[in-house]
Image (cartoon, grey):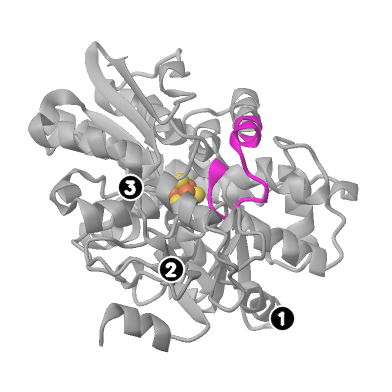
Amino acid sequence: MSCEEDQKREGQFHRMREAIQFDREKCIACTACVMSCNKVGINFLKIKEEGGKKHVEYNCDSGVDCIYCGQCTFLCPVDAIYEQKNIDEAERALRDKSKITIVQMAPSVRASIGEEFGQPPGTNVQKKMYTALRKIGFDKIFDVTMGADITTYTEAMELADRIKNGGVMPMFTSCCPSWVKYAEFYHPEIIPNLTTARSPHIHSGGAYKTWWAEKEGIDPKNIVVVSLMPCTSKKYEAKLEKLKIDGVYPVDIVLTARETADLLKKHNIDLMSLEESEVDSCGAFSGAGIVYGAAGGVMESALRSAHYFLTGEEIDQIEYKDVRDSEGVKKATVDIGGKKLNVAVIYLTKNAVPIIEEVLKNPKAYDYIEVMACPGGCVGGGGQPKPTNAKIIAERKKALYHIDDKTKIRKAHQNPVVKEFFEDYLAKLPKEKSSSIIHTHFRKREKFE
Ligand code: SF4
């Protein structure tokens, strides 16, 4: 059967893996999603004209596939393209008294979800969110930002190791699953360049279901981890079999920031009227983890720690402003213990193309490259509140840098929770087991994989 016939037979819905759903019956063929997809540089969605009537369909070219970034979900005037909903699943877990429910919020969500409750973009509602999540019944309030610290620790060690021991360079970040899908599908030749560090919510989910579960004497099978993310692609990532640890997914349910707001509203939570409260102790994080939510943040966090792993010394000057505020591509040369590193920060996969081509011609052109699929990084993620535009993204970003600035511990490797996880738990495990908790691997992917 041809791809066109397949689409006709599929019926009302087309599902982009576990991330996004397109409702053919609702669609009015306004082309907004098609233009968003084009802006990202993917062109998975396209307009077809048949018998004088337009409709949206997916691209049948075997060399074109969706990367699940969700940018198409922002502008649809009739909600015909949206994240696959997982609210019912989260509510079922909350009602199931045989389960321990852990909730963890991504860095950028604290700076955006207030918009769903009438606040201006960039309002930091972190501590009110902790109270809200306790109120609706989650047993443990942890934080993806702690996972971002684990990612930084793992990634910075890997960068230092690749530099010292002549590993494959440049190293690319891999915490954005849409970027990873892009690399695996469109440019598998750079797979050896991707850091093997897992992504933040997968790291923290895995840490809670191993280290924390052991400490608490809980069977990981009885833990449900719910991640509150700016992202539709994280729904796809969480269901990747390769990430299971001893047969258990690190993260069970992913809700976008929009779904999270819907869940709170369903429980009649008036967010802004709540008292503030703190994260539970194993969710504690550093300022380095917080800036993950903005493009350049992953790079900056890793550089703060890579300096320590390379030189054994702490740096005083920890703000790498040269990698902030990218306009899509930003290049800089940073000094780490007397060694000059050429780095690049990229958002929108389309902007990665010339850099990948440059790297393929001259692998020495860069040492370390961050790529995020969404505009401005996760602050502009496809699961963020609507509207999301450049001005709003800038305000959300400002809020994250402000939190980092006010946080006492600003380097991931100094986070005591992360230190305990690495030094008292992982270091005592056989290498293969510890690696299965913090590392991943990649492979070439086919269309719809
Ligand atoms: Fe998800 Fe962030 Fe990547 Fe967007 S940039 S796809 S929100 S991880």
In this picture, residue 51 sits left or right of residue 132: left
Separation of disc 3 and disc 1 at Cα? 35 Å
Q: Earlier in the sequence, mark 3 or mark 1?
A: 1
| Residue 244 falls within the magenta-colored stretch | no
Answer whether labels 3 and 2 touch (C-beta < 8 Å).
Answer: no
Identify the residue under disc 2: 49
In the image, what residue occupies the spot 77% across and 62% down?
Answer: 264
In this picture, residue 39 sits left or right of residue 271: left
* Secondary-structure class at tag 3: loop
Locate the C terminus and report the quarter of the image it occupies: bottom left
Which corner quadrant of the image does residue 253 belong to? bottom right
Q: Mark 3 belongs to which amino acid?
A: Ser
31 vs 162, nearest the viewer: 31
In the image, what residue occupies the spot 55% across and 29% down?
Answer: 409
Counting from the top left corner in percent of width and height, residue 416 is at 51, 39
* Secondary-structure class at tag 1: helix
* Magenta extent: 380-396
Q: Earlier in the sequence, mark 3 or mark 2?
A: 2
Residue 200 visible to an observer of this rendering: no
Separation of disc 2 and disc 1 at Cα? 48 Å
Residue lying furthest front in this view? 52
Counting from the top left corner in percent of width and height, residue 163 is at 17, 29
* Secondary-structure class at tag 2: strand
In this picture, residue 148 sits left or right of residue 85: left
Separation of disc 3 and disc 2 at Cα? 38 Å
Answer whether labels 2 and 1 touch (C-beta < 8 Å).
Answer: no
Packing grade of label 2 (10 A; few <14, some 14-19, many >=20) is few
| Residue 382 falls within the magenta-colored stretch | yes
Identify the residue under disc 1: 95
Packing grade of label 3 (10 A; few <14, some 14-19, many >=20) is many
Front label number (3 vs 2): 2
